[in-house]
Amino acid sequence: MSLTTLLAHKRKEILDAWLSLILETYPADSASFMKRQPNRFANPVGHTFAHETGVIFDHLLGDADVAAATSALERIDKIRAVQDFSASEAVAFVFFLKSAVRKVLTRELADGQMTAELFALESKIDDMALLAFDGYMQCREKLFQIRCDSIRRQNMMHRRVE
């Protein structure tokens, strides 16, 4: 059995493990809420993570196009960019997929027959992380620009008042 087939068979387990690793980066009560609350309106962040990680995973399996995966990364990046994470912490969620795959497929990967396929998958994950970093930085630059524009407007208003 190929690694891609195995990943497709274990999709739900891998996505659950990946989501758990992502949610561990949040405070315990927030993570608990995001895991428990399935309603997309009551829990938009948890819903976004659950949905978009699936799109990214499907792209890595070859079932989704690059544009869909890039959009999924952007939606997660937008959330992480406004939260209190360093750049490395914000983008680390992509690398958590490697851990999730290894955790779920421990027995299947033990014999080493899928090493070449695993390296290829991990290389794709690394490429996704680079895309996520670019997207994160674009979000942060936009936030910075919004803050600068706000300060300029405030200064202009203060000058008019004086």
Image (cartoon, helix red, strand yellow):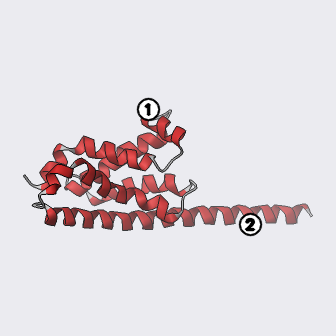
**Residue shown at 26% from the left, 41% from the top:** 12
C-alpha separation, residue under disc 1 versus residue under disc 2: 43 Å
Assign the C terminus to one quadrant of the image.
bottom right
**Residue shown at 48% from the left, 41% from the top:** 31
Q: Is residue 10 left or right of residue 136?
A: left
- In depth, the one of 61 and 1 nearer the eye is 1
Residue 135: which quarter of the image?
A: bottom left
Residue 110 location (% of width, % of height)? 16, 56
Residue 120 location (% of width, % of height)? 20, 66
Q: Given the image, on which type of amino acid does mark 1 rest?
A: Arg
Categorize mark 1 by other alpha carbons within 10 Å: few (<14), some (14-19), many (20+).
Answer: few
Which secondary structure, mark 2? helix
Compared to residue 124, the image places residue 78 above or below, namely above
Q: Say which mark, if any, is on residue 73.
A: none
Residue occupied by mark 1: 36
Query: Farthest left residue?
Result: 1
Which secondary structure, mark 1? helix
Q: Given the image, on which type of amino acid does mark 2 rest?
A: Arg
Q: Earlier in the sequence, mark 1 or mark 2?
A: 1
Compared to residue 11, the image places residue 113 above or below, namely below
Count of picture labels = 2
Residue occupied by mark 2: 152
Residue 79 location (% of width, % of height)? 50, 51
Categorize mark 2 by other alpha carbons within 10 Å: few (<14), some (14-19), many (20+).
Answer: few
